[in-house]
Image (cartoon, rainbow, N blue to C red):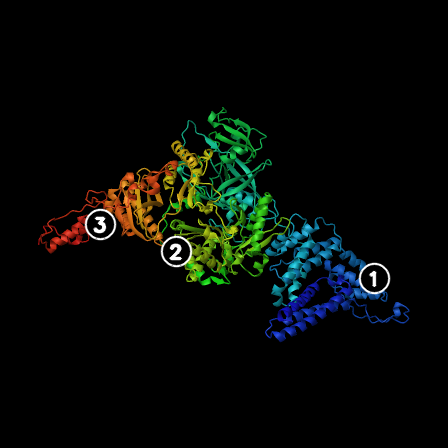
């Protein structure tokens, strides 16, 4: 037998001894004698086998680390206890008299009988009396005097005192039994003590095999003892299961909850069986067994606190009468106004420090966190800060009562929380205090919201939370989304109202019984909820004034009936309230989450940087990758790039299980409501597992191994147009844990290592023959280092009737912050390692791959076919497979299986595949680009939000339709100029312009642009750029590729364009400056385009055109002669275009004029000048004449200098030269002499 099998056999035998060791901790006195003998034989044979196997293992492995002494101690303990119990059952060896005559003449020596001494514990009485009656009372060879002698020898303390004074005669024996029975045979008391033992069981701090076995044994012992008395207990299993689960460690309790059927009744036996199985599974990992003495580990389970029978009564809250908490933890008490809390403490004569009801000096020494005084912070009183008064003009001096209601909400722990809410129809939103959110245990979500009050005073709120509120008067409840703030307003009313001066109807059920008493406001119900709770009934109250006459109409109070009860509000008579006038106005300015959509739009519109410096975070991420990446057996393995060491992650990250479990239940409900979606989603999970991309693990493994663990929620993404996976799962690694940290927060992002889409699109247009492909499951082809996979877990089960299981994801997973970097970086790593063997494929991975899409073209068909072969071979070295192959030539795909071919249009807008909008597609079959109409815009939802959302989804990375998009940008700017609210309709003129724009898009025919700009190696290739600015709209640029064949044929092809909307009413922004900004934009775009094209094209010349003579003049002047604004931009332009020529073009011939002004959609498709440039450039003999420009001093933005002498032929002396240099370089003579003020001399300058 090999070493592995020997150790496995020894482990099994060792497990047998361990189980017997747990067995002897039970109440052995109630077990049959034969069972004990069998157990003794079993432990003897097991220990002999254990010794034999250990000897064999030592012969093979001389360094075996098994601790024989512990197992030997266990065996000795088991054998000793079993032998002792067996011997105690043997009949007493009493020599019988041959002919016993009378008890008086019987001379018998009483041998010792070993029975456990009874000391008066009620729970020990039944075992004691059962053994005694069996061994002594039923022994006919003993007379009553002998039995009494034995009885007295087996009792101590109180039981002995009961019977010690009985005379030693035969009749006293039955009297002694009766005394003991009357005193200790108390069924209720015995059952109560066993229950107390259950309640006082030591909590399982760590889930190990020995701890669980000891725990289960102790439970079975107490439960069996209770059952012996046949108690009448209802819901027995419910109660005991609840008690036991509270004693278990969190992971064990959670694992049991996941495994059991939540709809079935709880079963005690099922729970104990589960714990037995769990202990068996943990047998091999139980380390606690090897470090403690056997007796010391289990003896504590027999110990019960002395005061168990008279346990303290649970604390009772004096406010809400709950027994689950004390007053200082009462949520309702905490929500009271500070003055209300102080009054409550005084009325109930409570301690100001501990808030308890005691009469002696308090032993606590708390200090108030606010003022450091000797009282509890909850009874600290702050004088209300006086707000700046608001002056209101009116004919009469009156005050206003604002309507309030008391409502309730249910906290996370099930506690009811009552609080006061203000009903305000003048508010567009509902608001709650952060204190209420904290007490309810709610988790706020991030939002970006500005709350605008009087005089446009703004308060930025970062969080919102859904809140379910309940009426205290009816069954009404509703859920409202509330924004969170620290304080809504001061106490309302600001002073106590004298109700005697108000003539209020009697028998009214008020929504706020104490509407006249100042209280804190924890919720503001805005118009979004107030009109929902109002009922039709309304009445008015006209209070009497001091003279007894009716007050004027403006002093009327109005009573409204609501689902919360009756609310009251309106004008109060003078004198009923004293205080300041409070004026509230709350308006929502909702700057909600269009960041992602608009961010993508502006990223597309921006000119990509040629070279970008790596941040320190990017450098660290790259260093981690290079030091840790492995490529073994054609499989990449990478670490998760974390901001901190892995050993610190557990403490920093916190617990994510509970929230992930909640999110999973929500997902399951949605899937159950859609059986077809559930089936597809389940198939995706099964495929994920079958491919080895993840596997089931025991949740508790992380706790046992003290590993950091993170559980990611997941949800379904539906992509109906997909030919492969229509439903897939997306994982959320941005979910915050209980420590408000997510896994993504701890990860490094990593730099972008691929070329941007702009470069790839330009290169894709240069070749005649194309191939496109997709790397199949690119992310999931990369292994994650096992040290980090504990951070990638999801919860799943195939059916709600099954226990929830944990799936650990072993591959790079979408949804993680670093996943895109890791996947694309592996492609670059593959190219770096095998560049010599596959140079063409390495070039494609670096320059022609966008995420997992490959777009490559070349003029030579053989090169394209070779590229395909190299690409497949190179990717296979990293276990990457390709599919969705397409080409504009059938020969290229001749060896590609039909199932791996794909001729549908490629949608480059990856993140918005489910949004139909104005975007760019590649039609691989027709070999062209297509821009289609997005269809009808719903004018019924015409708001700033809907307009910006629509514009943000316009996708044109290369700029083919920039003249159309610039119109949308202009409308976007007008919305900002008019300060249009997010959910409001735009002004009439903007609305009319937008409707016209969307209608033009609707009727626009699809625009088709040839993909290939045809040229050969013999052709002359030039880049031509144009810049223009419009004073009213924007400035824009466009670039063309000019190809001239050896025969003189010349063609122009639009390559790209960009635009910038003009600044809003910026002082000093003149038309020449706008034209200069256009030239700056052109220089950057041309530099980027030239840098990309030089990878494959020999560009002979570059020409740049502007229709501004002033800008061309500025570009030829010295920087020192230009004002700072112009000089700085001219300097940047020169750096980008140092060897290129700037020329003039008239506005009529300038195609960039279309970008700066904008064009209606239906006009663009037929605009020849836009797609093929100005006609004169089609002339192959056009020689690009040098433009004569005016550089005179009358140009704008030019410095004017004073010249002392124009006679350069004369010989000037040193003094004249110095003066000329000083004056020409300083605009202020006083500044020039400032540094020499102490040496100033008045008079003429002399030689």
> Could you tell me if the residues under marks 1 and 2 are in contact, i.e. CB atoms within 8 Å?
no
Secondary element type, mark 1: helix
Residue at mark 3 to residue at mark 2: CA–CA distance: 35 Å
Q: Which one is earlier in the sequence, the residue at label 1 or at label 2?
A: 1
Is residue 669 visible in the rendered structure shown here? no
> Residue 732: where, in percent of width, then height?
51, 50
Q: Residue at x 60, y 74 (%)?
A: 61
What residue occupies the far top of the structure in this picture? Answer: 549
Q: Which mark is residue 1118?
A: 3
Q: Residues within 10 Å of mark 1 (few under 14, many from 20)?
A: some
Task: Give the residue number, with chain letter if any, for mark 1.
Answer: 172
Task: Give the residue number, with chain letter if any, for mark 2.
Answer: 615
> Residue 993: where, in percent of width, then height?
39, 33
Q: Which mark is residue 895?
A: none
> Residue 1179: where, in percent of width, then height?
28, 44
Residue at mark 3 to residue at mark 1: CA–CA distance: 130 Å
């Amino acid at each position: 037998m090999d070493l592995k099998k020997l150790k496995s056999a020894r482990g099994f035998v060792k497990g047998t001894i361990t189980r017997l060791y747990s067995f002897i901790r039970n109440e052995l006195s109630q077990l049959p004698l034969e069972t004990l003998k069998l157990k003794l034989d079993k432990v003897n044979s097991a220990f002999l086998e254990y010794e034999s196997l250990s000897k064999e293992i030592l012969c093979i492995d001389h360094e075996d680390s098994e601790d024989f002494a512990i197992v030997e101690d266990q065996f000795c303990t088991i054998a000793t206890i079993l032998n002792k119990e067996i011997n105690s059952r043997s009949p007493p060896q009493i020599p019988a008299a041959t002919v016993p005559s009378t008890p008086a003449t019987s001379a018998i020596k009483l041998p010792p009988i070993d029975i456990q001494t009874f000391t008066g514990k009620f729970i020990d009485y039944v075992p004691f009396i059962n053994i005694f009656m069996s061994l002594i009372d039923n022994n006919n060879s003993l007379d009553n005097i002998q039995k009494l002698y034995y009885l007295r020898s087996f009792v101590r303390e109180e039981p002995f005192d009961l019977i010690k004074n009985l005379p030693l005669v035969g009749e006293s024996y039955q009297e002694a039994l009766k005394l003991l029975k009357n005193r200790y045979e108390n069924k209720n008391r015995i059952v109560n003590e066993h229950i107390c033992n259950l309640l006082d069981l030591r909590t399982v701090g760590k889930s190990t095999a020995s701890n669980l076995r000891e725990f289960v044994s102790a439970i079975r012992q107490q439960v069996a003892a209770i059952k012996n008395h046949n108690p009448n207990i209802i819901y027995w299993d419910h109660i005991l299961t609840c008690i036991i689960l509270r004693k278990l460690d969190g992971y064990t309790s959670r694992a049991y909850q996941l495994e059991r059927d939540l709809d079935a009744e709880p079963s005690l036996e099922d729970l104990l069986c589960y714990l037995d199985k769990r202990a068996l599974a943990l047998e091999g990992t139980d380390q606690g067994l090897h470090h403690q003495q056997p007796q010391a580990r289990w003896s504590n389970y027999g110990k019960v606190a002395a005061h168990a029978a008279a346990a303290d009564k649970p604390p009772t809250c004096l406010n809400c009468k709950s027994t689950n908490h004390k007053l200082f933890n009462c949520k309702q008490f905490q929500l009271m106004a500070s003055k209300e809390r102080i009054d409550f403490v005084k009325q109930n004569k409570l301690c100001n420090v501990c808030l308890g009801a005691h009469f002696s000096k308090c032993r606590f020494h708390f200090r108030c966190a606010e003022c450091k005084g000797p009282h509890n912070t909850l009874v600290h009183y702050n004088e209300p800060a006086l707000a700046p008064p608001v002056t209101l003009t009116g004919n009469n001096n009156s005050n206003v009562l604002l309507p309030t209601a008391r409502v309730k909400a249910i906290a996370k722990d099930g506690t009811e929380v009552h609080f006061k809410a203000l009903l305000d129809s003048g508010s567009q939103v509902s608001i709650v205090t952060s204190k209420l959110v904290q007490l309810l245990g709610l988790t706020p979500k991030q939002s970006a919201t500005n709350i605008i009050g009087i005089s446009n005073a703004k308060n930025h709120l970062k969080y919102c939370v859904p809140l379910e509120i309940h009426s205290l008067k009816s069954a009404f409840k509703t859920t409202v989304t509330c924004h969170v703030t620290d304080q809504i307003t001061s106490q309302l009313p600001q002073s106590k109202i004298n109700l005697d001066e108000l003539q209020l109807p009697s028998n009214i059920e008020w929504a706020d019984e104490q509407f006249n008493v100042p209280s804190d406001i924890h919720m503001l119900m805005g118009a979004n909820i107030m009109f929902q709770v109002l009922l039709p009934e309304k009445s008015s109250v006209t209070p009497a004034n001091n003279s007894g006459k009716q007050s004027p109409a403006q002093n009327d109070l109005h009573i409204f009936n609501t689902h919360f009860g009756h609310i009251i509000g309106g004008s109060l008579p003078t004198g009923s309230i004293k205080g300041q006038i409070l004026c509230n106005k709350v308006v929502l300015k909702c700057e909600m989450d269009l960041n992602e959509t608009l961010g993508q739009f502006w990223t597309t519109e921006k000119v990509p940087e040629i070279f970008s410096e790596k941040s320190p975070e990017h450098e660290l991420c790259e260093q981690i990758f290079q030091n840790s990446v492995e490529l073994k057996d054609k499989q990449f393995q990478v670490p998760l790039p974390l901001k901190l060491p892995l050993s610190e992650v557990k403490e920093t990250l916190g617990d994510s299980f509970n929230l992930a479990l909640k999110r999973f239940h929500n997902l399951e409900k949605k899937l159950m409501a859609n059986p077809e979606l559930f089936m597809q989603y389940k198939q995706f999970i099964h495929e994920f597992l079958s491919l080895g991309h993840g596997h089931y693990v025991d949740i508790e493994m992380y706790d046992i191994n003290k590993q950091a663990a993170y559980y990611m929620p997941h949800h379904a993404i539906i992509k109906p147009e997909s030919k492969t996976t229509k439903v897939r799962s997306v994982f959320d690694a941005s979910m915050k844990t209980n420590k408000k940290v997510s896994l993504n927060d701890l990860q490094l992002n990593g730099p972008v290592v691929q070329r941007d889409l702009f470069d790839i699109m330009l290169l894709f247009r240069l070749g005649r023959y194309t191939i496109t492909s997709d790397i199949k499951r690119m992310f999931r082809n990369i292994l994650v280092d096992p040290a980090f996979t504990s951070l990638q877990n999801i919860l799943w089960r195939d059916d709600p009737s099954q226990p929830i299981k944990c799936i650990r994801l072993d591959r790079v997973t979408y949804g993680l912050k670093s996943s895109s970097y890791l996947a694309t970086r592996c492609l670059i790593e593959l190219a770096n390692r095998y560049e010599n063997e596959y140079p063409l494929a390495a070039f494609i991975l670096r320059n022609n791959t966008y995420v997992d899409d490959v777009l490559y073209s070349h003029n030579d068909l053989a090169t394209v076919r070779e590229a395909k072969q190299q690409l497949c071979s190179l990717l296979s070295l990293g276990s990457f497979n390709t599919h969705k192959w397409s080409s504009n030539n059938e020969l290229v795909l001749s060896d590609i299986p039909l199932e791996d071919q794909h001729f549908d249009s490629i949608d480059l807008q990856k993140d918005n595949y489910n949004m139909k909008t104005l975007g760019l597609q590649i039609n691989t079959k027709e070999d062209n680009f297509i821009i289609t109409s997005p269809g009808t815009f719903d004018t019924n939802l015409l708001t700033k939000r809907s307009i910006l959302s629509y514009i943000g989804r316009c996708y044109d990375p290369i700029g083919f339709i920039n003249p159309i998009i610039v119109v949308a940008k202009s409308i976007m700017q007008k919305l900002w100029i008019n300060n249009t609210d997010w959910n409001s309709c735009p002004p009439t003129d903007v609305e009319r312009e937008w409707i016209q724009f969307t209608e033009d898009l609707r009727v626009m025919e699809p625009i088709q642009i040839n993909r290939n700009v045809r040229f050969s190696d013999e052709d002359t290739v030039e880049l031509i750029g144009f810049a223009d600015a419009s004073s009213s709209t924007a400035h824009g640029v466009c670039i063309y590729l000019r190809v001239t064949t050896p025969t003189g044929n010349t063609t122009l092809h639009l390559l790209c364009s960009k635009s910038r909307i003009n600044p809003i009413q910026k002082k000093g922004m003149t038309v020449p400056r706008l034209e200069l900004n256009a030239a700056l934009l052109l220089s950057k775009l041309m530099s980027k385009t030239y840098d990309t094209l030089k990878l494959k094209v020999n560009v002979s010349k570059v020409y740049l055109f502007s229709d501004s003579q002033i800008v061309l003049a500025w570009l030829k002047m010295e920087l020192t002669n230009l004002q700072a604004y112009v000089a700085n931009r001219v300097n940047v332009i020169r750096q980008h275009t140092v060897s290129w020529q700037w020329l003039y073009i008239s506005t009529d011939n300038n195609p960039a004029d279309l970008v700066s002004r904008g064009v209606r959609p239906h006009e663009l498709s037929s605009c020849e000048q836009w797609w093929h440039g100005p006609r004169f450039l089609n002339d192959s003999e056009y020689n690009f004449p040098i433009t004569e420009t005016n550089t005179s001093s009358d140009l704008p933005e030019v410095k004017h200098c004073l010249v002392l002498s124009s006679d350069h032929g004369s010989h000037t002396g040193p003094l004249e030269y110095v003066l000329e240099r000083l004056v020409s370089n300083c605009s202020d003579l006083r500044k020039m002499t400032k540094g020499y003020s102490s040496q100033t001399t008045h008079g003429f300058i002399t030689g």
